[in-house]
Image: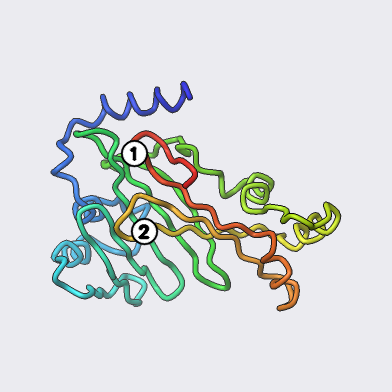
Amino acid sequence: MKTLITTIIALSLGITTAWAQHTATSVLHNMPNELLPYINDNQMDEIGKFTIDNDTVKIKNELNGTSTVTTINDDFAKVDLNESSLMLIKLLPVNDSTQIVCLVRTVKTPVPESDVNFYTTSWKKINSRFNLPDTHDDEEMVDAMTQRPDGMSEARFNELRDYLEPVIISADIPEGGSTIVFTMSVPLTTEKERNDVKAILRQKTFKWNGTTFKMY
């Protein structure tokens, strides 16, 4: 908890730009090349012209593919980088003058797998999970995403947990709220095994409360 409070204080002192000056459009436009390597400045300008009245904005990226902004508003952006990659940006309020950026990147094939990170609005990495589970910690994620139903033996529960390797987690940020939803995939199984494993899988939703995420 001390570490989290220290992080929030540091953010509050380090970011002095008014909250109202930051929107998903402006944050996306200022995203550094290392985080978005195949969209150049001119293409970013095209994205910046997106308004809520538009349905979508499609741009030709530097990989000769198409990147599509499907949603963007004051605090949320959804960008299909290409056919197999998705990016979500969510601005989370810390106080009246400070926001942080939650960035979710998802590889959609062969099954969705996500990476979740946090940044300041000037795209400096924040080394905190804000109480979210670490999607790269297999043991933590299996413990978080499974539950033994009443009446199921411990042996059967452990047998079904073995089907969860490799551990693959996808994350979604539903538009219009401040929640993040984690879902576990079960790729290397038969249809029957997948159906059996559903009995122990639990989708997890976390809600931002202004300082951290809480189980929702």
At 52% across and 56% down in the image, what residue appears?
A: 182
Labels 2 and 1 touching (C-beta < 8 A)? no
x then y, percent, for residue 181: 47, 55
Q: Which amino acid does label 1 sit on?
A: Lys
Whole-percent x, y for residue 58 in the image: 25, 75
Tell me the crowding category of disc 1: few under 14, some 14 to 19, or many 20 or more residues within 10 angstroms, Cα based.
Answer: few
Determine which quarter of the picture holds residue 169: bottom right
- Above-or-below relation of 204 to 72: above
Quarter of the rendering containing residue 70: bottom left
Q: Which mark is residue 88?
A: 2
The structure residue drawn at horizontal position 46% and vertical position 21%, both measured from the top left corner, is 2
As drawn, which residue projects farthest toward the right?
155
Q: Please, which colouring scheme is shown?
A: rainbow
- Amino acid under label 2? Leu
**Earlier-in-chain disc, 2 versus 1:** 2
Q: Where is residue 12 in the image (x, y as percent from the top left)?
A: 27, 28
Which image quadrant is residue 76 in?
A: bottom left
| Residue 96 to residue 79: above or below | above
Query: For mark 2, does the 10 Å Cα neighbourhood hold few (<14), some (14 to 19), or many (20 or more) residues?
Result: many
State the residue in front, 30 or 115: 115
Residue 46 shown left or right of residue 106 in the figure? left
Figure check: 213 above or below 192: above
Q: Is mark 1 on a helix, strand or loop?
A: loop
Residue designated by label 1: 124
Q: Is residue 108 shown left or right of residue 87?
A: right
